Image: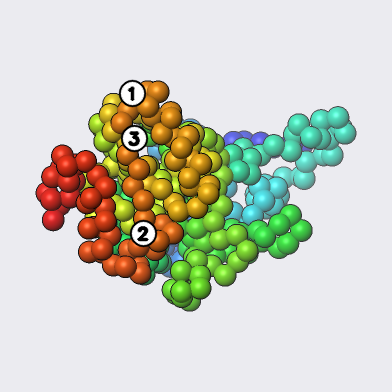
Amino acid sequence: MARDNASELARRLARDAEAVCRHYLSNGRRQGRYWMVGDVRNTPGRSMFVRLSGPESGPGAAGHWTDAASAEYGDLLDVIRESCGFVDFRDVANEARRFLSLPRPEPEPKQNRLRSRKSPAPLGSPEAARRLFGMSQSIVGTLVETYLRNRGITVLHETGSLRFHPRCYYRPDDHSPTETWPAMIAAVTDLSGHLTGAHRTWLDPGGFSETTLGKARIDTPKRAMGDLLGHAVRFGVAGEVMAAGEGIETMLSLRSVLPPMPMVAALSAAHLSAILLPDTLRRLYIARDDDPAGDGAMATLIDRAQEAGIEAIVISPRLGDFNEDLRLLGFDALRAASRVQIAAQDVARFMELAA
């Protein structure tokens, strides 16, 4: 048989959706037109339902599933991947062919090999980021919420851009085995709200310590994927006023004392300097990190804002960043320091009304 693509494999699996479910989601059971189970990893329960019949594509297609508890969704290829713990699409496809009793694909001519290796969601692509975010769940009651609260962040409104994945893949390098760690997944979006990338913060399931601040004990506990340039993780919808800075924890710390103010995290100094500014923006607060990279990003962003006719005001932390201020100096100190650095009309608008 010629090499199968993902959509064809998914269609073939959907024709035998109940058999797929009985095999890979054995802890569930049929109820009417659906297979009910706890989640895509075959946990006992009833929050996830797989449609067993329906058209081959479009709304209501057979083989499509949704987890009402976590907002995860996908098709039967996702079921195979998650229930078997696969990382590479090649392994998922081979398992699907084995289940369907299909022959393995014939070796391709050498000149076509490079072109044909591309999967439906290439590693690190915006599509891979969208799939990861879609497979993650609300942070409410999860390790992400605990992680943020341990860092002093208790104001968690308008944080739909953050999600939790209990077993997010982590690979130290190309020559090391893949590990799984719980992770905070952040959606990176453009000005229209379209998801272009994702940021992963792997977390320590053992809890918080002053050494790791709750991040996993791995070499690079933070990584981004997808299209990041000009885009950001967003908290609230920007209008005439917005604050921008580097880290997620930094901006959520500042938002603790300015809760109604829309804010964005660009994820690095380089990306902060290149962030795209909304047409509605009239005043931009730049939340500076106290280091040389932060100073460089601040200077570039001030120039860009002024060229666009936007007032730029720098807010500086007393320590290294605003999360350090919040954790080590306390809420009241951060609030007082922020109050004297923002415009008087914004004190009334974003601070006093939120008191």
Residue at mark 2 to residue at mark 1: CA–CA distance:
29 Å
- What residue lies at 44% left-to-right and 51% top-to-bottom? 289
User: Picture coordinates of residue 350 (x, y %)?
Assistant: 19, 46
Q: Which mark is residue 318?
A: 2
Which residue is label 3 attached to?
Answer: 312
| Residue corresponding to mark 1 | 309
Dot 2 falls on a residue whose secondary structure is loop
Left or right, residue 102 beside residue 331? right
Mark 3 Cα within 10 Å, few/some/many (few <14, many 20+)? some
Nearer-the-camera pick, 216 or 181: 216
Q: Amino acid at mark 1?
A: Gly
- Position of 353 compared to 216: left or right? left
Residue 107 position (above or below residue 221): above
Quadrant placement of the C terminus: bottom left
Question: Which residue occupies 36% across, 59% down?
Answer: 318
Q: Amino acid at mark 3?
A: Ala
Say whether residue 315 is visible. Answer: yes
